[in-house]
Each structure stands twice: as structure tokens, then as C-alpha cells.
Image (cartoon, rainbow, N blue to C red):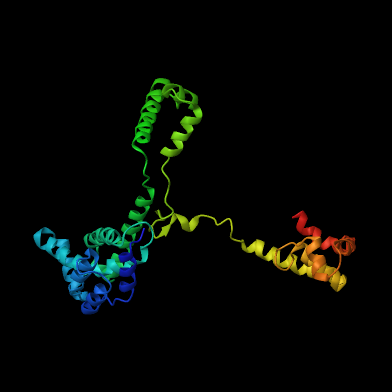
Amino acid sequence: MDTPDDVSIRNEVDETDNSDPEHFEEAASKGLSSDDPVRMYLREIGRIPLLTADQEIELARRIESGGSEGAIAKRKLVQANLRLVVSIAKKYVGRGMLFLDLIQEGNLGLIRAAEKFDYERGYKFSTYATWWIRQAITRAIADQARTIRIPVHMVETINKLKKITRKLAQDLSRKPTEEEIAAAMEITVSKLREIVKVAQEPVSLETPIGKEEDSKLGDFIEDKEAETPASSVTQDLLREDIIEVMAGLSPRERDVLRLRFGLDDGRTRTLEEVGQLFGVTRERIRQIEAKALRKLRHPNRSRRLREYIDD
């Protein structure tokens, strides 16, 4: 859940130029108290000068050599790119973690990038580090979403369930049934199922997947509400055929059917409602509707629409 400071910082950093330390510090200072930890952190890293491409390569070489000099070089490379972490972390605010926590997780990814950076490939360190920072943040979000607060007594029950299940599996040399587990725990099968349901660990939609882990599980979940391209085309064709079939009706008959079946706006009307719109009785509307439907049932007209029903 975002705090007001999280939202404020996100808005300020959106406007921050990472290449300008003074601008970064100025943007970080807006709207926050002087003792705010996020403000203090942003102000501190905003004073660290950025590196040139040649400086990055030199530090990478020293890191590769190892030893104390390599450790110092890694620290310098990481510190000079802390603002990159902030610019990436702000894009993930609102996904269940505080802004400062996102930054800390991103920093771990930055450190990993500094350790694995291959300067001989010719690309900038920031380009390489961005992937590691995003991976660290998305994994942390997934882990956070996977955490459930379970009452202490239920945790003990779940542990008992696991222990008994393992023992039964060993004794029976097979997977125990629900009835056997419930009997061993001295509870009903329905109660056992409730415990199992609580014990199940959910999978976060933020879980990184793919070889590069640059996609989220949620990207591949089908949206049942979304209309498929094939369905959309079918609906368009059906709409066109209905219009053509209804061309043989009188204007009043067409209007009555459109209102009764919601052909224009998806909202169906009662005989009473349509009658009020036309200033006639509901019985008169029923007669007009019946006559129009009889016309549509004629083989020459109904054949075109029957194809959609058969499909």
C-alpha cells in the first residue's frame, strides 16, 4: 500500500534528470520533511557524480581483477548508478511494496549486475544493469504477494497436517487419502479440505517468467471478458446480416424489434416500454412484433441467420 510520501516521491522522480546531480537533489527535496528517510537517501545519491563510458570500463576491469581494488571499484560502479535504480523502482510503486523497499531490492540487482558486467561486449553498464534491477524488483514483488498472514493456531495445524501426511506416506508406501489423513488428525474430511485450502501457496501474477524473465505470469492469463478477433468478426457479420434481413420489414417493425431485442444498445425493452415510446398499447406492439418475426422466419430470410446458430 502506498504512503503519501511514496506517491510524492514517485511524482518528483518522474521529473528528475539522472544526469544532473543538482536537479536530482532539488527534485528529491520537494514536498518532504527534512528527516524523511526517502528524501535523505535521494539527496545523498544525487550528489554522487555519474561515470563516463571509459570510467565504467576501467572500473569493470578492476572488478574483474578482484581483490581489494576490485571491491572498491565495484562499490564505485554501484554508487554511481543508484539513481538508475530509483528511476526504475518508481515504475513499480503501487504493487504492494513501499518505494524505499523497491529501491533496496533494485540495489541488490544493481550489485549483481556490477559483478557480472562484461565490458568487452561494448554496451553501456546502465543498459546491462537495467535488466538485473527489474528482475530483482519483480521477484521481490512476487515474493511479497505470495506472503499470507495466517493465524498462529492455523500455522500449527498446517504443520501437523504436513507431519501426519509424511508419516502416513511412509507407513503406507503411497500417498494417503483424504479420509486417512482426516482420521489420523481426528477431524472431518470437510475440515481437512479447509486446512489444505489455507495451506496452499498462491502464485503471484507478478512472478517473472520466460528465459529472460522479462515477462510476468499475468501477461499470459486469458481475459475471459476480452472479445477474441474471431468473435469480433462474427459479431460484425451477424450485425450486417441482421440489418439486411430486416430491410424487408416496415420501418415500424424494424424499430419495434430493435427496441424489444436491444439490437442497438444491448438493452431489451418490455412490450409496455415500447408501447409507451410509440404511443400505442402493449398488445399492439405484440402484434407488430409477431408479424415481423413471421416475416423473418421465411426460409429466404432465416437461412442466413441460421448459419450463426448452427456454428
| Picture coordinates of residue 116, whole percent (x, y) | 24, 60
Q: Is residue 311 above or below residue 288?
A: above
Q: Is residue 100 left or right of residue 67?
A: right
Residue at (36% x, 63% y) in the render: 92
Q: Is residue 201 left or right of residue 179?
A: left
What number of labels is visible? Answer: 0
Of 207 and 96, nearer the camera is: 96
Residue 189 seen by the camera: yes
Of 285 and 79, nearer the camera is: 285
| Picture coordinates of residue 156, whole percent (x, y) | 34, 32
Quarter placement of the C terminus: bottom right
Q: Is residue 165 left or right of residue 5?
A: right
Extreme-left residue of the structure: 68
Residue 244 seen by the camera: no
Quarter placement of the N terminus: bottom left
| Residue 38 occupies quadrant | bottom left
Q: Is residue 239 above or below residue 149?
A: below
Residue at (43% x, 39% y) in the render: 198
| Residue 297 occupies quadrant | bottom right
| Picture coordinates of residue 39, whole percent (x, y) | 23, 68
| Picture coordinates of residue 112, whole percent (x, y) | 24, 58
Extreme-top residue of the structure: 171
